[in-house]
Image (cartoon, helix red, strand yellow):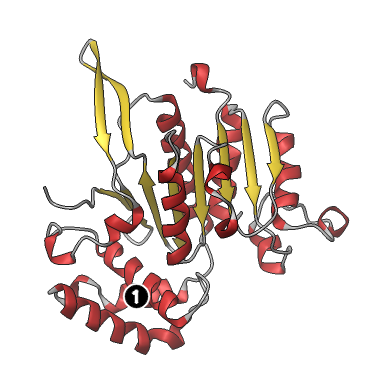
Amino acid sequence: MLTNKLNSGFFQSRTRVTCEKFCKNIVLAGVGSVTLVDDREVTEEALSANFLILPDENLYHGKTLAEVCCDSLKEFNPMVHVSVEKGDISTFGVEFFGKFDAVVISCCSLAKKKLINQKCRKLSKRVAFYTVDCRGSCGEIFVDLKDYKYSKKKLEETVECQLEFPSFEDTISVPWKALPKRVSKLYFAMRVIEQFEDAEGRNPGETSIADLPGVLNLRKELCETNSVNESQIPDALLERLLIGTSEYPPVCAIIGGILGQEVIKAISGKGDPLKNFFFFDAMDGKGLIEDISEPK
């Protein structure tokens, strides 16, 4: 499927459960290289949830999460070059990201998502950019492929297609009242939580049900500003996102699998890509694709 794209390089920041599923999938697919960045130490939570960390302290003592995951991924496919880069990705220069064909970041702040996406877009070459987040039973993928050309089968013919993707910052700046009425409620809810964490100076996932009053106040402000009814963001959904700060393995498997397929499609240039958000909620078992762009 990858043909001459087997030498593609992938960069992945923050090795949470969803991204571990994704990394396993693309390593097994036989991509050229994968680079991991995550300087956090191995914790009890990571040990219990991360299948790439073996329950032997001698194997992970003194190592970062990225280093431990790197060792395990190499065993899945020795033909793929898996490496680790240390440091804060927000300090990496634009040229650093030019070494890769795809950049995937997870569990990053709102400001960091915007910054890394901007750096990828400044490059003369197209670098596929993805953000992925799972909160409890819900998951989200964002995709930016810039000006993307690809081919797909239509009846008995192969047709050439082209799509223009907006940046993450431009996408979330689209006024809510300009969006279709049936946009996923999860889109709005994730933006509220994201902005709450940003305003409070929290890292992603550093919220709890105790933050619900503040989150509801922010929801009210955002809905009034955007002329959207608060019923678009149900209390129950926000509660689930606040309670579910840890990842739910079945959701991680689904999101990680879809992300792997999308990245491989984007690099190979074959098949319709996801544009530009994907949402999954285990409560109803539905996956939704939402094209959120400035109205033309």
Residue 8 point in image, percent of width and height: 55, 29
Give 62 or 110, whichever is nearer the viewer: 110
**How many labels were placed on the picture?**
1
Q: Is residue 258 above or below residue 19?
A: above
Residue tagged by mark 1? 238
Query: Label 1's element?
Result: helix
Find residue 146 and report its image quarter: top left
Q: Residue at image x 23%, y 48%?
A: 291
Give 26 or 200, whichever is nearer the viewer: 200
Q: Residue at image x 20%, y 15%?
A: 155
Q: Amino acid at mark 1?
A: Leu
Q: Is residue 50 above or below residue 144?
A: below
Q: Residue furthest right?
A: 58
Q: Is residue 93 left or right of residue 62?
A: left
Residue 167 point in image, percent of width and height: 33, 50
Residue 17 point in image, percent of width and height: 58, 55
Q: Is residue 230 visible?
A: no
Q: Is residue 76 visible?
A: yes
Q: Is residue 95 above or below residue 159?
A: below
Q: Residue at image x 40%, y 32%?
A: 266
Q: Is residue 156 above or below residue 112?
A: above
Residue 98 point in image, percent of width and height: 53, 38
Q: Residue at image x 71%, y 68%?
A: 44
Q: Is residue 51 left or right of residue 288?
A: right
